[in-house]
């Protein structure tokens, strides 16, 4: 019976993630081991549970009947383990996290180290990337995200409001016709984060509603850190998280453009599945990080 229960848990993960390889990553098993468990379960039941092809997996009708029970079994076991672990003075388990790549250059990394030191039996697996990650598909427990949220089915907590600034290298800015309002920047070279819309939005002094200017980016990349270095090199201007350019502004390598005009702040959120496998541990991590993220970026203002 224990072998079948283990195989059902593996089957549920394969069905939820859509591939043996993704399930293997999430379970820290070899793909061959994952395939073996599913094959053994099918042999025990004398029923095919998955249609296999070189491109995708699909549930058979019998697989669709078994999956809800397999999920319920796994969730019940994880709730019990999480409740016990979460209430323990020494919680255990693995948390798999994703965060924007630019956060790797901030004090957040020291905060991760502090959490690890405070919880020696908890393993952290953190991916810093600006590429979109799907929590369920990628087997993740939590995401730190900056910007507009689209995961409406997930639980969220706003941790901070991130200030952004429009910056350029002094030699680039000095070579342009002086700008007084955002529309004067329409001919300037703009460096764009590819995941954001190609527009410049700035709030006039003393106002709340932003002014928008449509732009045709000269360079578009998927990394805020890369944008900063491109701008420092004098290739154009960009709106960047203030935390990533503090030192360059202080050293004079970058200057703020149209001071007095402000880029709208961007929310920083913790996002996790509503049926999180390690709910107690996830919430413990969020509570630990919330004041530290707020201290890094600034508290929630609205």
Image (spheres, grey):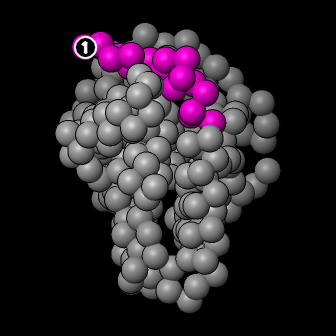
Residue 182 visible in image: yes
Is 58 magenta? The answer is yes
Image position, residue 35 (x, y; %): 27, 36
The residue at the point 40 percent across, 46 percent down is 7
> Compared with residue 238, is residue 295 higher up or lower down, i.e. above or below?
below
> Compared with residue 180, is residue 92 higher up or lower down, i.e. above or below?
below
The residue at the point 20 percent across, 39 percent down is 32
How many residues crowd around disc 1 within 10 Å: few (fewer than 14), some, or many (20 or more)?
Answer: few
Given residues 60 and 107, the one toward you in this image is 60
Mark 1 residue element = loop
The residue at the point 48 percent across, 20 percent down is 59
Given residues 54 and 251, the one toward you in this image is 54
Occupied quadrant, residue 152? top right
Given residues 196 and 209, the one toward you in this image is 196
182 vs 138, left or right, is right
* Stretch in magenta: 50-68
Image position, residue 2 (x, y; %): 43, 58
Occupied quadrant, residue 286? bottom right
> Compared with residue 31, is residue 92 higher up or lower down, i.e. above or below?
below
33 vs 37, left or right, is left
Given residues 232 and 205, the one toward you in this image is 232
Which residue, given by chain and number where applicable, does mark 1 sit on? 54
């Amino acid at each position: 019976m224990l072998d079948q229960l283990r195989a059902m848990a593996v089957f549920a993960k394969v069905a939820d993630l859509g591939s043996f390889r993704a399930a293997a990553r999430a379970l820290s098993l070899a793909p061959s081991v994952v395939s073996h468990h599913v094959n053994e379960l099918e042999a025990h039941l004398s029923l095919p549970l998955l249609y296999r092809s070189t491109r995708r997996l699909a549930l058979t009708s019998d697989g669709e009947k078994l999956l809800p029970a397999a999920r319920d079994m796994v969730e019940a076991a994880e709730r019990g383990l999480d409740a016990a672990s979460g209430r323990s003075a020494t919680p255990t388990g693995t948390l798999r996290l994703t965060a924007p790549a630019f956060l790797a250059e901030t004090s957040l990394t020291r905060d991760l180290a502090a959490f690890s030191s405070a919880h020696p039996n908890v393993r952290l697996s953190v991916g810093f990337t600006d590429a979109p990650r799907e929590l369920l598909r990628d087997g993740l427990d939590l995401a730190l995200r900056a910007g507009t949220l689209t995961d409406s089915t997930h639980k969220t907590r706003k941790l901070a409001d991130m200030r952004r600034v429009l910056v350029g290298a002094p030699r680039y800015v000095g070579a342009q016709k002086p700008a007084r309002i955002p529309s004067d920047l329409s001919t300037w070279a703009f460096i764009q984060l590819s995941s954001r819309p190609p527009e410049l939005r700035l709030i006039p002094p003393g106002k709340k509603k932003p002014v928008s200017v449509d732009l045709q980016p000269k360079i578009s990349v998927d990394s805020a850190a890369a944008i900063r270095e491109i701008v420092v090199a004098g290739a154009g201007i960009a709106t960047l998280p203030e935390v990533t350019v503090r030192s360059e502004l202080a050293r004079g390598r970058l200057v703020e453009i149209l001071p007095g005009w402000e880029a709208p702040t961007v929310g920083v959120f913790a996002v996790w599945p509503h049926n999180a496998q390690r709910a107690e541990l996830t919430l413990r991590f969020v509570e630990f990080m919330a004041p530290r993220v707020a201290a890094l970026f600034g508290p929630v203002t609205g």
